[in-house]
Image: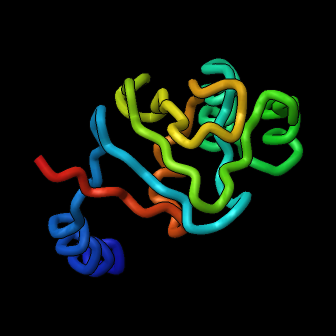
Amino acid sequence: MKFLNVLILILPLSLFTEEITYKEGDSFQSTKSRSLVLYEYKADASRVNIALRFAFNVEEFMEYAAVDSRDIYKVRKGDTFVITESLYDGDIFRVTLTSKKTNNDKYFILSKDLKDKSLTQIQVET
């Protein structure tokens, strides 16, 4: 009976939630410094994504998802980037950093990071 009550409470919530989808060409701007990370290599982003999804404790996460700090870019306030490609069914995106604060301009970002409150999506008018 409890299961049925919980199901009745949760079902309407799941029907009315919208899945935010991102597509190529979407632009974002950071409003805070160092709250997001861009990965230089697709393998690093993929490994962190898998670890976030399947790790059961902090020790497993740290063992599997360790990324060299030289291979990441901490997004600074005012940085803008554009999604150029979707990978792994939208779990990871290839982005181009349009603010030229680093030598490399191609990075990867996790889709969960795009939902961060420190990012604002820039509306491009056509």
Does residue 58 appear to the left or right of 92 in the view shown?
right
Q: Quadrant of the N terminus?
A: bottom left
Q: What residue do we see at 62% from left, 32% from top?
A: 50
Does 61 sit above or below residue 18?
Answer: above
Vertical side of 125 occupied by 118: above or below: below
Q: Of residues 69 and 89, which is closer to you in this image?
A: 69
Q: Nearer the viewer, residue 94 or 55?
A: 94
Left or right for 9, reference 59: left
Q: Residue furthest left?
A: 126
**In the picture, residue 82 is in which quadrant?**
top left
* Left or right of 125 in this view: 98: right
The quarter holding residue 13 reads bottom left
Residue at point 80%, 30% (across, down): 64
Q: Position of residue 89 (x, y in %)?
A: 35, 27
Residue 11 in the image: state x and y as whole percent: 21, 69
* Residue 33 coordinates in the image, percent (x, y): 70, 62
User: What colour scheme has been applied to the protein in the rendered image?
Assistant: rainbow
Give the x, y percent position of residue 117.
51, 69
Could you tell me which residue is drawn at 11 percent across and 46 percent down?
Answer: 126
Total number of numbered labels? 0
Q: Nearer the viewer, residue 86 or 104?
A: 104
Nearer-the-camera pick, 97 or 111 = 97
Query: Eyeballing the image, is 41 above or below 113?
Result: above
Q: Report the residue at 26% width, 74% height from top.
A: 4
